[in-house]
Image (cartoon, rainbow, N blue to C red):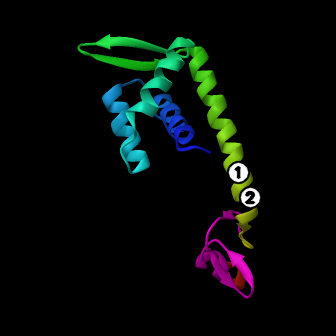
Amino acid sequence: MRTGSLIKIFVLLSLLEGPKHGYGLMKDLENRLGVKPNPGQVYPFLREMKDKKLLKTEKNKRVCVFSFTEKGRKFAEDQIEKFGRILEAALKPKLKTCFHCGCKVYDGGYVADKKVFCCKFCAEACRKI
C-alpha cells in the first residue's frame, strides 16, 4: 500500500473523531504518524472528498473547518472497516491464543510448559488448576 493510501486512512480516522481545520488535521496526523505529513497528499484528498460531497466545510473565523456529511461518514466507516479486514488478514497467522483465558496474543506472550499464555498470571492460574 502506498504511503498516500495510509495517510488517507489516517485523515478519515481523524475526521471521524470530529470536525477539524486544516492545521489541526495536519498536527493530528503528525502526532499519529510520528512524521510531518505532506500537505500535497492531504489537501488534494480533502478537496476530492469535498467535490464528491463526502465533506462539508464551514468558515470559522479565518479557518476552514472540515467535517463529514452523512454520506461521507458512511464512506469513512466503510473504508476503515475494509482496512481493518486487511490488517486482520495480515495479523491472523501471527496470532496465538492464550492457553488459559483464550485471548489473542500477537507478540511474545508468556511461554510455560510449551504452552502460550498472554501473561504470567494466566500461566500461574493454569498451574493451580
Picture residue at 31% right of the left edge, 30% below the top: 23
Q: Which residue in the structure is indicated by mark 2?
A: 92
- The answer to whether residue 32 is above or below residue 68 is below
- State the image coordinates of residue 122 (x, y, percent, origin top left): 65, 75
- Closer to us: 41 or 97: 41
Residue 2 left/right relative to 33: right
Any mark on residue 64, and which?
Answer: none
> What kind of residue is marked 2?
Lys
Picture residue at 39% right of the left edge, 51% below the top: 34
What is the secondary structure assignment of the residue under circle 1?
helix
The part of the chain drawn in magenta is: 101-124
**From this viewpoint, is residue 21 visible?**
yes
How packed is label 2: few (under 14 Cα within 10 Å), some, or many (20 or more)?
few
- State the image coordinates of residue 78 (x, y, percent, origin top left): 66, 29
- State the image coordinates of residue 113 (x, y, percent, origin top left): 73, 88
How packed is label 1: few (under 14 Cα within 10 Å), some, or many (20 or more)?
few
Q: Is residue 38 magenta?
A: no
**From this viewpoint, is residue 68 visible?**
no
Give the image quarter of residue 18: top left
> What kind of residue is marked 1?
Glu
Residue 7 left/right relative to 102: left
- Considering every residue shown, the one lying at the far bottom of the view is 113
Q: Is label 1 in contact with label 2 (beta carbons under 8 Å)?
A: yes
Q: Which residue in the structure is indicated by mark 1?
A: 88
Q: CA distance from mark 1 to mark 2?
A: 6 Å
Q: Is residue 105 magenta?
A: yes
Give the image quarter of residue 59: top left
Picture residue at 53% right of the left edge, 19% below the top: 49
Picture residue at 69% right of the left edge, 63% below the top: 103
- The answer to whether residue 43 is above or below residue 29 is above
What is the secondary structure assignment of the residue under circle 2?
helix
- The answer to whether residue 79 is above or below residue 114 is above
